[in-house]
Amino acid sequence: MTGAESVTGAGAEPGTAGALSGSGAGSGAVFRETTADPRTQAVPLSHLSLELGHLYMEDFEAGPQRLREHFARVRPWADAARAAATVPGGRRPRVSTCFLIDDYFARFSSPAELVPLIVEEAGRAGLTVDYLARESGCAVTGKVPVAEAVAGRIVESPPPGSYGLRPPARQTGWLANGERSPVARAPQAMKRAVPWEPPKETAARRHSVFLDVELWSDDADGHRLWSCPFLAAVWQLARLGLLRNEGEAVFVAEQPDPGAFPEDWDELPSLVRLNPRADPFAAYRTASVLPSRFLPVEHAVRVVLDQLDVDHGALRQVAERSAREHAAVPDSVADRVSYVFYAGP
Amino acid sequence: MARPEASAPDAVLACGEVRTRLLPTRQALDIRSAAQFLALRADERVLLSERPALYARSPETLTGVDCPLPSANGSRVRAVGTVAARAALTEGRVLQTSAYFRLPSTGPDQRRPWGHYLVRPGVVEPFGKLLPEAIAEGVLGGGRPGDLDVGLIADGLLTRLLRHPLLDQRPPLRSRPTRLRWAALPAAPGAGPSLERFTLAEDDLRTVRLRVPPAIPPDRIAGLCDDLALHDWLLTTVVHLLDGVRFGAPEPSARPRPGDDRPAAVLALRPAVDHLLHLWMPRARVASELAPLWDTLERQPGFTRQWQALVQRIRDQLTLHAIPALYREAELTP
Amino acid sequence: MIVFAASDKGGTGRSVTSANLAYQRALNGDHVAYVDFDFGSPTAAAVFDVPSAVRGTRERGLHSYLEGGTPEPAMIDVWRQTEHPHLHAWPNQSGRLVLFPGDIGGGEFATDEDALERCVDLLLRLNGEFDVIMVDLSAGRSYAVDMALAATAHPRMRNVPFRWLVFHRWTRQHVIAASGLVHREHGIIRGGVERGHDELALRSAIRFVRAAVPDPESAVWSQGSPAQAAWMQSCDEALRRLAAEHAIGDSVVLGIVPLEPILQWREQLITEEDVLATQIANKETLEALEEIARRLTDDTYWGQP
């Protein structure tokens, strides 16, 4: 871990549940095997992680004017989000800001050129970018296959009538917020085929808003391309301090080299701290200020977040620390996420 | 709010089912292969332990359910939540999948957003109030079609694991999987845990009814039941093995195996020595507060006593066959 | 050991004969599973005399299992649940005899990738529990035959030994049809090779059972006229020549089941009681079944002819 973030309290809390304790083990046991104990590393947490924008190639190609305009529009909403992040006792809330650059779906420009530009344009609008992240880091960070690990944590919301039998036809690579229309399947001889039925949102109130999200696609060589909503869901988990790899924190902020930013995106860490005095990157809640064209993507993010079984150790740490601080954190991970969608490109 | 106890409301009942079977491989898996085999999640470690025996356990996985609970009194209480499941491999030889959940006494009257249930792993919340006693008996007796069936979830995980390419599908002996269903009701205030009933039901089904202090987390109860299931399976398997052996003088007509002139008894018993006899180790993975429950079974019917008798019988047979046939059959042929 | 029972046409006595072979193996101490993949007309329940047990497994049979409707197919312990008067008592030293029935009212269905995986799951599970797994397949080039070929070519099944028995009656039409099922275009061998089987190995694992064969030497026919006997003799020889021409000659025959009214009319298991006490079955039939059952695992009867 190269990050300079410090954690109040223990750096790593040994897991209490799930150890392979034998009859001799328990508190005060003499014999112990480290491979038999689950451990979860703690990460420092702010109250709010405030996202000041996503930058895609199209935005970059539209020129610096687009960035300037973006930050100018974000400013009032960012102020509002800060103002809303009150803390009991009148203390100053810890709020960190972040900015995400897409270097996954298309490569453009370079950190050396782009990062100073972002910092400058944000500053012009009176905003500070504390942390800068690369979208590729949501797919793979270092050697950790983050997206693949998160995909392995999907626990689908069961439609009524789910009693333990695995659904016969699962659409791999897709995740829905309800039941799909039944697929026409060749019936047994002399039996009738099933007629069409509409899809159904499980949490529907009377009528459905059914959404089916493509999580990834595989090309002919077997190379997997993660979808934008899925990586955005990973991004939210990172900001909520809920990503772990074998108990270790992933997406840990690194201080950039004192000199210039590199010419190649691959040489930039997944998450860099641009403001040395920033509050911790991860937070109890997140807020994102985005143009309204992101609405469908973020709806999909919510569908994904609502069906993720996130690391139990990380969840427990967030719950314990927020309780100590009397900070209100919703149970459901999807409810920890909020947005402002402004009209604009 | 995300309270630390969000995942631990007061449970009035914990239930589960364990599937136990021989791993279908010619050789037992070593500890590294076991870790690879049980890696159900890319980002979570397989827990490994080498004392007092090789043991590996997968991360927990969750399965969502929304269905009526089985009940012995005919009530049909709908419940929603997640059932936890995990797999374990003992000495790289015996594979177990275990699914379990616990029930609080009451729950909301309608289904909540799914995220509410996911932060309470292994908890299934009833709609309204429930009678733990009736549900416990319902689970042990098996529900009606469409009722919550934890056994299916344990079976689903087992099926998934058995498709793993590491397995060569060459089991060294014929054996049958077993199922063990369990239900743990709260113990009286101040009372310790107790084993109320251990039943050998149909061919491969066992049921266990327990009383457990409410503070004990269900994965520990599952750990106890995994241990009971493992040892019951060992007994069952070795008893069946001895059942099929024709002892005494060799019958030349009985199932000749070309190229192998060893007596049938030796052929049949050898795999037990190679693969099973060293696995007996009651309480090895049982939490200390639950370990005393084993004593109940040791007194009556005496699990370890039966095991020792079986082991002795196998050793005697093999010793007998080590004696040259001339002397061994001497008294049989007047 | 998995043994697939196939036939080109109905009426060959495939189901009843394979059930009798399963019964014989179990009597001899093997643990035996009988898997009813005769999807169009699952009838094994009648042969094993377990009709009421089968009624209790509605919607949990092999059709439902393969289609993903039930994770564990129903199984019936024949010794315990049969209504056959002579089978009630589990014979001493015999192995388990377990029937996996199809769904009542189930029909032929197209199998897909999922069904194939489940079929492999089932066969592997049975391979761990039983010594002999007898799989009765729908007649002709059926989905069941297809699935059996695909399943045995599956990488997970690479270490599981299997053999095929092809049943046919002793007539011109049946000899030609049985040969076609195995050797012609889209037959078992070509179809198997398409799915990844080694042709030689597959060929070595296929044997034929001639069913309902009238034995000219038998006492049953000794009442006939000399002309009739001579005619039967010459027909028999002609059929042998025909069979040899169609590559299903004596060298690839595992056994011959005599014409037996009890198999033709009642479709039941033949017990020693039927031969000795009630004398409704012929001793030769029982002996033939015992012999074929023994040869199933006798390697000298298998391999390249």
Image (cartoon, rainbow, N blue to C red):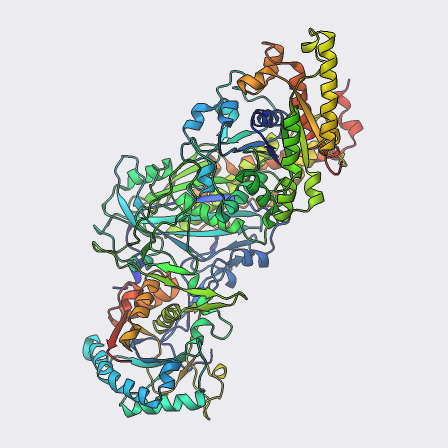
Q: Residue A163 in the image: state x and y as whole percent.
A: 35, 45
Residue at image point 40% right, 32% down: C58
Image height check: is B5 above or below A44? above
Q: Nearer the viewer, residue A250 or B316?
A: A250
Give the total of numbered labels: 0
Residue C293 visible to the viewer: no
Q: Is residue A344 left or right of residue C90?
A: left
Image height check: is A320 above or below A204? below
Q: Nearer the viewer, residue A284 or C301?
A: C301
| Res A310 → quadrant | bottom left
| Res C214 → quadrant | top right
Q: Nearer the viewer, residue B322 or A257?
A: A257
Image height check: is A173 above or below C230? below
Residue at image point 33% right, 55% down: A157
Q: Residue C110 in the image: state x and y as whole percent.
A: 48, 42
Residue B327 visible to the viewer: yes
Q: Is residue B142 left or right of residue C34?
A: left
